Image (tube, rainbow, N blue to C red):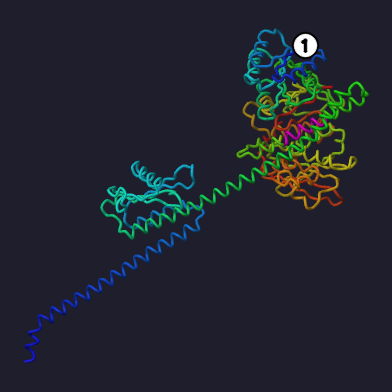
């Protein structure tokens, strides 16, 4: 009795169950798809965040362009390419191997700052997708996913791809701003250094010029009222001060030359005895030149250096030592071996140099600080700056050491290298 | 003595001309390369040429080359360019000497005297006998004496000394010395020169640490002091 109605309702129950099942299935599917979508969204978000982190820490965002392309193409197998414009005026960087057509697309996309291709409402009929790398006010490049055709990316994927691209764009923009700030800073520094240098050099030039002008004009206007001795003294002063100007000019030009990029030294195997011997010969022509005493350790190896520059360096140091020490005090020129280096020391018994200035005497005239320049110790002009530049050009160093009983020791250290073999016992 | 002075700067040209005239030289002047070439072709015999390099219509080096194709007239370069590489190139191309501006008249006259004595020829050495500061070198007799005592030199040392003596008072470049003493394939071996010059100085100089006969021209070459 009871079974009949049941049987009678069976189709309904079956239908109901099926519907319920279908509903459950549909719900499950919905939930599953929701879950998948959420997972995918989370994945995209994570990818975005990771790439964002990468871009934030990147000093050179452009080196990560392959990561960007990888993130965009994923495992889809679409060919990719990118075009970067990290700095205005510089050449575009092209990554991947876009053909002429794709390159034109990349350029158009970067110029216009608009996405184009499938799914973008802009040249949607094109088979390739182009996305700009957008900075704040312009695109700094573009990327392409090629051969999409009808498989336009779903809108959320497209938005994600554009977001990745924009992170690269912003990173490039940030780097561009940093570069511009650094360049502006360097330019300002160069300007101020140059101004200080010009002021210092013109000061150094004016002093001997004043003496020359004074002496020559005295000869010109008072010549017939001066004694022969006075006239000869004036002429002598003109010659001496001209020699000073010549040295100053040589120093300034040489310093500028060494400061230029890619300057080549004319190095050869030189003997320390010869370089010092030639320097002594030059200094002996001066009336106070006899004060210089040289001491060279015997058996020094040959030095790999530019002899003309080394001579200029020694001349400057010896000239300073003679000029700024008492007229009776000796000036020593010592050369010896010190481990793997040759040490050239020029030592005087002058007043010494204030500790505050010891490290600064070598660049006192190019500091950009005119007040400090006015108080610099005597002798710390172009000459010492040149000496240090010469030492550094030889991978050596020049330093100043105070001496035990007063005075300075200027010490040049040059690295020793293996000298070539000499010919076999040639007579 | 007739000189040709090639210098485009008027002030320097006039100053040098007057200073040379005081010493008894007859001085022809040219202010351009074209002018100098014309004078060279038409002035007849010249005893020496003083040549500035930076001329308004070309480089003085062209004149040196043109001159050396025909004559061995002594030529001194006077240049504002203080570049060792160029100095060496011009000396090797046949210039007798190279003076960097500015220079004193005394120095110019001294260099001119040396150049005139040599007449720019190496093939026919003007000097076979050299004396200075107790040193006596007799190239013909192959003999070297210091303070009257015979000095024993190795063959290479003598060759090197003789090469310098033949051009006494003038710089001989490293390259030239190496080629003439060791041969054409040794022109890069500057360290041979360092060794043998050191040995020569040890034997011949009063104070080898402060040579006054065998002189170094840093980065260019060597010079034996003018005899006297």
Q: Which of the 4 image quadrants contains residue A111?
A: top left
Residue A241 among those drawn in magenta: yes
Task: Evaluate whether residue A352 shows in this view.
Answer: yes
B166 vs A398, nearest the viewer: A398
Q: Where residue A237 appears, x then y in whole percent? A: 85, 30
Q: Where residue A154 appears, x then y in whole percent? A: 30, 59
Image check: A278 left or right of A264? Answer: right
Image check: B211 left or right of A394? Answer: right
Q: Chain of mark 1?
A: B
- Specify start and end residues of the magenta stretch as a single range: A240-251
Q: Main secondary structure of the magenta part?
A: helix
Relative to A53, say whether B66 is above or below.
above
Q: Which of the 4 image quadrants contains residue B164?
A: top right
B57 vs B60, nearest the viewer: B57
At horizontal 69% and vertical 33% (from top left) the residue drawn is: B192
Quadrant of the image containing the C terminus of chain A? top right
Task: Evaluate whether residue B208 shows in this view.
Answer: no
B42 vs A226, nearest the viewer: A226
Q: Which residue is mark 1?
A: B26
Q: Where residue A392 appears, x then y in whole percent? A: 68, 44
Residue A286 among those drawn in magenta: no
Q: In the rendered picture of this protein, how many numbered marks are placed on residues?
A: 1
């Amino acid at each position: 009795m009871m079974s009949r109605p049941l049987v009678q309702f069976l189709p309904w129950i079956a239908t109901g169950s099926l519907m319920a099942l279908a509903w459950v299935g549909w719900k499950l599917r919905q939930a599953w798809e929701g879950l998948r979508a959420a997972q995918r969204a989370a994945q995209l978000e994570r990818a975005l965040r990771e790439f964002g982190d990468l871009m934030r820490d990147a000093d050179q965002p452009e080196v990560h362009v392959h990561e960007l392309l990888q993130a965009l193409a994923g495992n889809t197998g679409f060919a990719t390419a990118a075009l970067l414009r990290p700095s205005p005026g510089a050449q575009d960087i092209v990554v991947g191997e876009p053909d002429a057509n794709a390159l034109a697309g990349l350029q158009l996309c970067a110029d216009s700052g608009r996405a184009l291709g499938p799914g973008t409402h802009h040249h949607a009929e094109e088979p390739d997708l182009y996305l700009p790398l957008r900075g704040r006010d312009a695109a700094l490049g573009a990327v392409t996913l090629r051969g999409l055709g009808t498989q336009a990316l779903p809108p959320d994927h497209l938005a994600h791809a554009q977001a990745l691209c924009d992170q690269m764009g912003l990173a490039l923009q940030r780097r561009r701003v940093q570069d511009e700030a650094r360049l502006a800073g360097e330019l300002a520094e160069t300007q101020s250094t140059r101004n200080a240098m010009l002021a210092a050099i013109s000061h150094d030039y004016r002093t001997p010029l004043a003496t020359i002008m004074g002496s020559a004009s005295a000869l010109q206007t008072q010549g017939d009222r001066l004694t022969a001795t006075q006239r000869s003294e004036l002429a002598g002063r003109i010659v001496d001060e001209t020699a000073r100007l010549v040295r100053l000019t040589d120093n300034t030009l040489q310093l500028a030359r060494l400061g230029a990029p890619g300057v080549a030294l004319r190095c050869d195997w030189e003997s320390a005895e010869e370089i010092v011997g030639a320097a002594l010969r030059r200094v002996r022509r001066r009336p106070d030149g006899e004060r210089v005493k040289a001491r060279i350790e015997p058996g020094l190896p040959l030095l790999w250096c530019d002899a003309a520059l080394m001579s200029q360096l020694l001349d400057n140091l010896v000239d300073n030592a003679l000029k700024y020490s008492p007229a009776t005090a000796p000036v020593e020129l010592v050369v010896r071996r010190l481990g793997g280096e040759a040490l050239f020391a020029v030592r005087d018994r002058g007043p010494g140099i204030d500790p505050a200035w010891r490290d600064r005497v070598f660049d006192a005239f190019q500091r950009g600080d005119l007040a400090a320049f006015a108080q610099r110790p005597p002798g710390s002009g172009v000459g010492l700056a040149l000496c240090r530049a010469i030492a550094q050009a030889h991978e050596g160093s020049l330093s100043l050491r105070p001496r035990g009983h007063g005075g300075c020791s200027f010490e040049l250290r040059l690295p020793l290298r293996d000298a070539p073999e000499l010919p076999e016992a040639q007579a | 003595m007739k000189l040709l002075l090639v210098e485009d700067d008027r002030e320097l040209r006039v100053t040098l001309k007057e200073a040379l005239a005081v010493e008894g030289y007859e001085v022809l002047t040219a202010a351009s390369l074209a002018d100098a070439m014309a004078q060279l072709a038409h002035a007849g015999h010249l005893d020496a040429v003083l040549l500035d390099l930076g001329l308004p219509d070309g480089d003085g080096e062209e004149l040196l080359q043109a001159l050396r194709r025909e004559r061995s007239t002594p030529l001194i370069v006077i240049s504002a360019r203080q570049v060792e590489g160029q100095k060496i190139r011009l000396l090797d191309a046949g210039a007798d000497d190279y003076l960097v501006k500015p220079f004193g008249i005394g120095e110019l006259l001294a260099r001119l005297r040396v150049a005139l004595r040599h007449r720019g020829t190496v093939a026919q050495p003007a000097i076979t006998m050299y004396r200075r500061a107790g040193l006596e070198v007799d190239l013909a007799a192959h003999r070297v004496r210091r303070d009257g005592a015979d000095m024993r030199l190795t063959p290479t040392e003598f060759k090197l000394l003789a090469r310098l003596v033949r051009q006494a008072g003038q710089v001989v470049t490293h390259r030239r010395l190496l080629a003439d003493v060791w041969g054409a394939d040794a022109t890069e071996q500057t360290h041979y020169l360092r060794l043998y010059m050191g040995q020569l100085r040890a034997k011949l100089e009063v104070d080898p640490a402060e040579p006054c006969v065998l002189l170094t021209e840093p980065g260019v070459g060597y010079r034996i002091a003018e005899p006297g």
